[in-house]
Image (cartoon, rainbow, N blue to C red):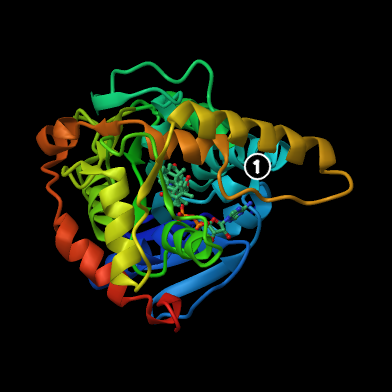
Amino acid sequence: MATRLRPSSKRCAVIGGSGFLGRHLVEQLIARGYSVSVFDIRQSYELPGVTFHLGDLCDKQALLSALQGVSLVFHCASPAPSSDDRALFQKVNMDGTCTVLQACREAGVQKLVLTSSASVVFEGRDIKDGKEDLPYAKKPIDYYTETKIQQEKLVLAACDKEKGFLTVAIRPHGIFGPRDPQLVPTLVDAARKGKMKFIIGDGSNLVDFTFVENVVHGHILAAERLRPESPLCGQAYHITNDEPVHFWDFMSQVLVGLGYDAPRYHLPYWLVYGLALLLWLLALLLRPILQLQPTFTPMRVALAGTHHYYNCSRAKEDMGYKPLVGLQEAITRTVESYPHLRQGG
Ligand SMILES: NC(=O)C1=CN([C@@H]2O[C@H](COP(=O)(O)OP(=O)(O)OC[C@H]3O[C@@H](n4cnc5c(N)ncnc54)[C@H](O)[C@@H]3O)[C@@H](O)[C@H]2O)C=CC1
Ligand SMILES: CC(C)=CCC[C@@H](C)[C@H]1CC[C@H]2C3=C(CC[C@]12C)[C@@]1(C)CCC(=O)C[C@@H]1CC3
């Protein structure tokens, strides 16, 4: 019979630790004296104190060997939202999360912190100051959101004080910062193709964009405050910068900071949404013969043209959360971190 290592409270694993958020989380955990095992399908860096375990989270045996002696697990792995691959999302976010839960229980893990998403309540309509008690989206706008909802439900339902296995979900929104492979690169790519001249809607919609270091701070606070007697058990928490901003002002600041023109001309929201939907259907029909990746997906158009900002007072009250980096400093640091994406760079 395999021997089980005694879990140590400063030994943790980060599933998805090679990704954007995962790597920032790993760096901060190391700085705080944790020893970290990264479990991911790829290795994207090396860092003293970090052990890499390459594997797919759908493979329980591979997970079990990475979770030996680990008391705390962060699960922040997911296929990229842009992949739009239903089967992959179901396999990784739903079946894979069941496997993660099973492996955690078998390995004697005591705490699991899931990176969920504030989008689990977003249906493409305005959300202003949304609290955690909003119902899950009944008609999720894409497969990513659909499976993030199921994933969060699975993890929160697995919280079991009697069995000594505690879970909590963090719901960040619009994560950005150095090394983000999604928001700034997509924006710059669209600008370089001349697609960022238009503002979708009247431009007055307020949105949360959250600096990656604040998201990391929320995760670590949640892990450290998650105890049998704490209110965190089995709960979800919004983590934002607590400074909603006009979507198009944020985009313009990043674009201008990198030397591109800010979008200027307005287009009606429903017109662009309708076109994006048509394009998405066309891409779906042509998929067997042609791989189309439209920039303006229905989800992106909805995010660009509606209000979606969230209240994070539950995290403030229950875990003492407060953003560490303000939005202006965060934008400056992010823009400076992408010299290669500058106009002409
Ligand atoms: N980027 C954002 O704005 C937001 C992200 N989130 C959530 O945050 C988490 C992290 O996202 P990012 O760091 O932005 O994404 P990312 O794509 O940079 O990182 C995800 C990591 O998961 C790994 N991964 C994917 N499938 C795997 C599998 N089957 N087995 C093992 N590892 C696998 C990838 O290799 C990658 O390193 C995700 O759960 C995402 O849903 C939530 C809200 C907003
Ligand atoms: C309109 C347009 C093409 C803008 C370019 C930027 C977008 C790529 C980002 C703007 C808001 C971002 C966002 C996400 C991905 C990147 C954006 C669409 C998420 C969908 C990532 C995963 C989540 O859980 C929610 C995020 C909401 C905001």
Residue 127 in which image quadrant: top left
Q: Relative to 318, does residue 1 appear above or below in the rendering?
A: below
Number of labels in the image equals 1
Residue at 16% over, 60% down: 328
Q: Relative to 164, does residue 195 appear above or below in the rendering?
A: below
The reply to whether residue 338 is visible in this rendering is: yes
| Residue 152 point in image, percent of width and height | 45, 31
| Residue 20 point in image, percent of width and height | 44, 62
Residue at 45% over, 23% down: 123
Residue closer to the observer: 236 or 164: 236
Q: Could you tell me which secondary element the residue under label 1 belongs to?
A: loop
Residue closer to the observer: 334 or 341: 341
Q: Relative to 179, does residue 214 appear above or below in the rendering?
A: above
Residue 281 in which image quadrant: top right
Residue at 26% over, 34% down: 309
| Residue 175 point in image, percent of width and height | 35, 52
Q: Relative to 8, does residue 85 appear above or below in the rendering?
A: above
Given the image, on which type of amino acid does mark 1 rest? Asp
- Furthest toward the right, the residue is 289
Residue at 63% over, 43% down: 92
Residue that label 1 marks: 84
